[in-house]
Image (cartoon, rainbow, N blue to C red):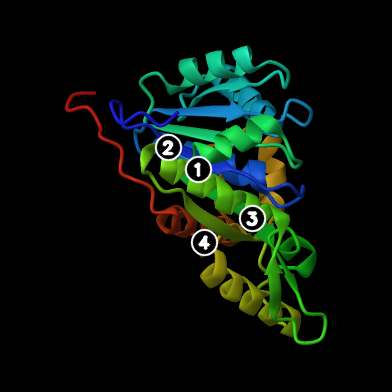
């Protein structure tokens, strides 16, 4: 999927567990890139939940209703059935795009596995709990030290090896710590230590994501993001903090800068 000729960079959000803020983070990432002038496409592989697709549907309706132009990526939702439809969508979305943002289902899925293998940046959002950590690794119940990587981590490891063998490229695997509580607790420290241990063992980077805030749920019906909140209402202190979180997350992802045209 990643084509050096048009500098396409594929960003895949993948986690086989729901409720980690995966789709919200994927949409905010796509809009943040589009706001910088990048040509962005989005592909929702979760035809059941269809959160990314519905989010962007809502955004398109808000633009139509308000008469305002907002940063807007191209997007499609996969039917979940045929490889032909999957390939056709990839061709359309990849054409003349700088970034392709793919949101995968919260379950094992053959199309998600293909997307992961072809990712340039693989983002796995997780909450700060051992319930979520169990997706990527297991810990000793007494010492809380990592005992072994999970099946999911081993699958990502194999995907990275296949990618390196096929085209010599590497997958930058980023574990995104979403919904981190503001008060440090003993359990959070244990989870943080376990993540750091496992990152050295299986080779992923760890960055901070988005906190648990009501504003993210309130923005969904209009398809808006924190980058748009100033356009449609006043900014309170918590909104300013959320926008700063988003900026820091984008910096942590360390995505390539889009090559913008000389004349808009």
Whether residue 176 is visible to the viewer of this picture, yes or no, is yes
- Of residues 226 and 31, the one nearer the viewer is 31
CA gap, disc 3 and disc 4: 12 Å
- Residue drawn 68% across the image and 48% down it: 15
Q: How many marks?
A: 4
Residue 104 at x, y percent in the picture: 65, 37
Residue 162's label in the rendered image is 1
Query: Relative to 186, is 98 on the left or the right?
Result: left
Work out whether 99 lies above or below 202.
above
Identify the element where label 4 is drawn.
Answer: loop
Identify the element where label 1 is drawn.
Answer: helix
* Label 4 CA crowd tier, 10 Å (few <14, some 14–19, many 20+): many
CA gap, disc 2 and disc 4: 20 Å
Whether tag 2 and tag 1 are in contact, CB under 8 A, the answer is: yes
Residue 154's label in the rendered image is 3
Work out whether 20 lies above or below 162.
below
Of the image marks 1 and 4, the number of the one nearer the N terminus: 1
Whether residue 227 is visible to the viewer of this picture, yes or no, is no
Identify the element where label 2 is drawn.
Answer: helix
- Residue drawn 73% across the image and 18% down it: 81
Residue 166's label in the rendered image is 2
Residue 141 at x, y percent in the picture: 82, 80
């Amino acid at each position: 999927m990643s084509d050096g000729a048009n500098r396409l960079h594929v960003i895949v959000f993948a986690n086989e567990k729901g409720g980690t803020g995966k789709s919200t983070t994927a949409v905010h990432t796509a809009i943040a890139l589009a706001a910088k002038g990048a040509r962005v496409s989005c592909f929702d592989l979760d035809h059941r939940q269809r959160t990314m697709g519905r989010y962007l549907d809502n955004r398109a309706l808000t633009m139509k209703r308000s008469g305002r132009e907002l940063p807007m990526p191209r997007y499609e939702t996969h039917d979940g059935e045929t490889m032909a439809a999957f390939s056709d969508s990839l061709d359309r979305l990849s054409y003349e795009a700088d970034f392709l943002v793919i949101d995968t289902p919260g379950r094992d899925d053959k199309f998600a596995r293909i997307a992961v293998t072809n990712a340039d940046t693989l983002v796995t959002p997780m909450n700060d709990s051992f319930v979520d950590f169990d997706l990527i690794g297991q810990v000793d119940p007494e010492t809380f030290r990592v005992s072994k990587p999970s099946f999911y981590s081993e699958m990502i490891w194999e995907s990275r090896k296949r990618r390196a063998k096929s085209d010599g490229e590497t997958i930058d695997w980023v574990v995104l710590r979403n919904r981190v509580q503001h008060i440090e607790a003993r359990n959070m420290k244990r989870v943080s230590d376990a993540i750091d241990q496992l990152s050295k063992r299986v080779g992923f980077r760890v960055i901070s994501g988005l906190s648990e805030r009501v504003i993210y749920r309130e923005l969904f019906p209009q398809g808006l993001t924190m980058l748009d909140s100033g356009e449609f209402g006043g900014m309170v202190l918590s909104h300013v903090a959320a926008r700063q979180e988003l900026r820091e997350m984008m910096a942590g992802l360390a995505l390539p800068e889009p090559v913008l045209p000389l004349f808009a």
